[in-house]
């Protein structure tokens, strides 16, 4: 750590603020510019946010994610509205499902007994 003495750190911070501090007008200008830039580049932001979310949540980079979704939903094969299926306890990625089938597993709390009971019900009733 470059500042072992807290007083040296405080002196450095004060000096830095004097040298590089922004006025309220400059801060407001930067804030407005950032808002306008985001509006003009909505699609770019949307894609970047999605990529960042997948990396933070599942630990997958863009190439890994693209490989995962390339075959579509592992239950029905659709390429529409795909989700990363993962174990909520361990966080381990299991595969790729469409939103409908991912929700189905979620509503069944990922319990095989519930899904087997649902299958038995459908076999009996259909």
Image (cartoon, helix red, strand yellow):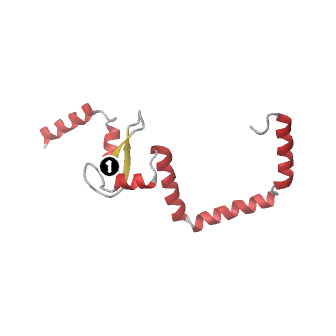
- Compared to residue 39, the image places residue 19 above or below, namely above
For the view shown, which residue lies furthest in the bottom direction? 40
Q: Where is residue 34 in the image (x, y as percent from the top left)?
A: 66, 62
- Compared to residue 13, the image places residue 21 above or below, namely below
Secondary structure beneath label 1: helix
Q: Position of residue 113 (x, y in %)?
A: 25, 31
113 relative to 70 in the view: left or right = left
On the rendered image, what quadrant is the C terminus found in?
Answer: top left
Residue at 40 percent of width and 52 percent of height: 65
65 relative to 2 in the view: left or right = left
Q: Position of residue 121 (x, y in %)?
A: 18, 37
Q: Mark 1 points at which residue?
A: 100
On the rendered image, what quadrant is the N terminus found in?
Answer: top right
64 relative to 29 in the view: left or right = left
Name the foreground residue: 51 vs 27: 51
Residue at 45 percent of width and 44 percent of height: 58
For the view shown, which residue lies furthest in the front direction? 2
- Badge 1 density bin: few <14, some 14–19, many ≥20, Cα 10 Å: few
Residue at 86 percent of width and 36 percent of height: 7
Residue at 34 percent of width and 39 percent of height: 107
Q: How many marks?
A: 1
Q: Position of residue 59 (x, y in %)?
A: 46, 45
For the view shown, which residue lies furthest in the top direction? 113
The quarter of the picture where residue 67 lies is bottom left
């Amino acid at each position: 750590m470059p500042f072992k003495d807290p007083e040296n750190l405080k002196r450095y911070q004060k000096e830095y603020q004097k040298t590089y501090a922004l006025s309220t007008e400059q801060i407001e200008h930067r804030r407005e510019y950032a808002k306008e830039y985001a509006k003009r580049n909505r699609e770019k932001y949307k894609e970047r946010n999605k990529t960042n979310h997948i990396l933070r949540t599942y630990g997958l980079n863009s190439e890994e994610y693209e490989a995962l979704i390339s075959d579509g939903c592992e239950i029905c094969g659709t390429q529409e509205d795909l989700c990363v299926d993962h174990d909520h306890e361990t966080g381990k990625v299991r595969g790729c499902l469409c939103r409908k089938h991912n929700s189905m597993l979620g509503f069944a709390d990922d319990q095989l007994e519930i899904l087997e009971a649902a299958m038995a019900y459908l076999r009996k009733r259909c």
